[in-house]
Image (cartoon, rainbow, N blue to C red):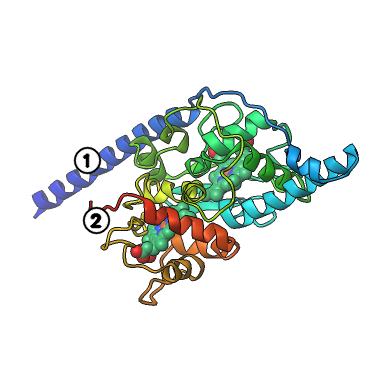
Amino acid sequence: MRTVIRIVLGLVALLAIVAVGIYAWATVASDRLLSRTLASHSVDFPIPFPLSPEEVAELDATEEMLQELALQRALERGAHLVEARYGCGACHGEDFGGGVMVDAFPIGTILGSNLTSGEGGRTAGYGPTEWDRIVRHGLLPDGRPAAMPSEDFRRMSDQELSDVVVFIQSLPPVDNVVPPPELGPLGRILVATGQLALSADMMDSHQAPHAEYPPATAASVEFGEHLAGVCVGCHGADLSGGPVPGGDPSWPPARNLTPDPSALGEWSYGEFVRAMREALRPDGTELLPPMNEMAPFAQRMTETEMEALWMYLQSVTPVPVGN
Ligand code: HEC
Ligand code: HEC
């Protein structure tokens, strides 16, 4: 009996040593990954974007009125982009003064920064390059990888990013000092082993030029593909689904969105809209997180945007479920 107890205690001690060893390694390895600096290009674009020559030609207005109008239009576009398509507020808080991305031990506490001009706001010294770096490259101003899923935003055009900035700059200041991300033991192991990939590492290039303007707003495959830029981070580049990279372990795999009969091939447009806006499957059951969190945003998408998205999903190469 004594011998058995001794063996068990020995094994427990050994496991504890191994666990401490793994944790120590993961701490060093994840710190190294997070403190690297990556180079990215410098960009420049106007904030706000000026009116197009066609718009100016249609208006009989003074220079001052044109500037005022350009700002107003950028603000309207920016509000729609943020509220319907990019959902920055889901992590940065409704007032953009700070919010929660992940707060789950043992993964860690990853909070969305304060983006306003109040105390603790991070964007005071930001110019186009810094905005480009964080939003489209997942890099902090000093080049360290950020804990923000920026792969969803990398297809944003200069005009759209500029519009989002105009919207954020119009918000009232919020005083709130948000602590930097803090990883728990599991979060560190996931980062160290590459299971929780940093978005800056998911991009092939930090030098490739960005489009100046988005495709024309229309019920078209081209515009739909642009809109689907925010879906591929979870649903995969070919939209065939699978486990969400770096996602909460409790989330189900992202579904296959291709037009194969085993995926969305038999769905009607109405069923798609209901899934997006009401988080309900065709059989009436509820979609699970994080997909259901998209409903409030999809409710604010226009009919043209919904149609374009659906046209694009129906146009991609069908992939049977399970492949
Ligand atoms: C899924 C959650 C999430 C979404 C959506 C999101 N962010 Fe973030 N964002 C974060 C987190 C987390 C950080 C903190 C990153 C860090 O410090 O490593 C951050 C940081 C930032 C920062 C500050 C970086 C710094 O200098 O400290 C800016 C600016 C920013 N985000 C802008 C945006 C904009 C604009 C959008 C929408 C287009 C957006 N974010 C959408 C999670 C998110
Ligand atoms: C943060 C990750 C994430 C993002 C971003 C995301 N999805 Fe999903 N989506 C999921 C997950 C996970 C599921 C599976 C939910 C379930 O099984 O209940 C899902 C399910 C779906 C479904 C239901 C499919 C079915 O067979 O039941 C549709 C439709 C869908 N997503 C469309 C989209 C579109 C379109 C976008 C982009 C505009 C998008 N999703 C963006 C994670 C995401």
Mark 1, residues whose alpha carbon is within 10 Å: few (<14), some, or many (≥20)?
A: few
Left/right placement of residue 249 relative to residue 173 reads left
Q: Residue 320 carries which label?
A: 2
Q: Which mark is residue 95?
A: none
**Picture coordinates of residue 220, whole percent (x, y):** 50, 52
> Is 52 in front, or is 97?
52
> Residue at point 50% right, 32% down?
145
Tag 2: amino acid: Pro
Q: Is residue 48 visible?
A: no
Q: Mark 1 points at which residue?
A: 14
Q: Is mark 2 on a helix, strand or loop?
A: loop
Q: What element carries label 1?
A: helix
Q: Quadrant of the N terminus?
A: bottom left
Q: Quadrant of ligand 2?
A: bottom left
> Is 157 in front, or is 61?
61
| Nearer the camera: disc 2 or disc 1 | 2
Disc 2 to disc 1, C-alpha distance: 46 Å
> Residue at point 41% right, 72% down?
286
Which callout, 2 or 1, points at the residue further toward the start of the chain? Answer: 1
Mark 2, residues whose alpha carbon is within 10 Å: few (<14), some, or many (≥20)?
A: some
**Picture coordinates of residue 76, whole percent (x, y):** 72, 52
Tag 1: amino acid: Leu
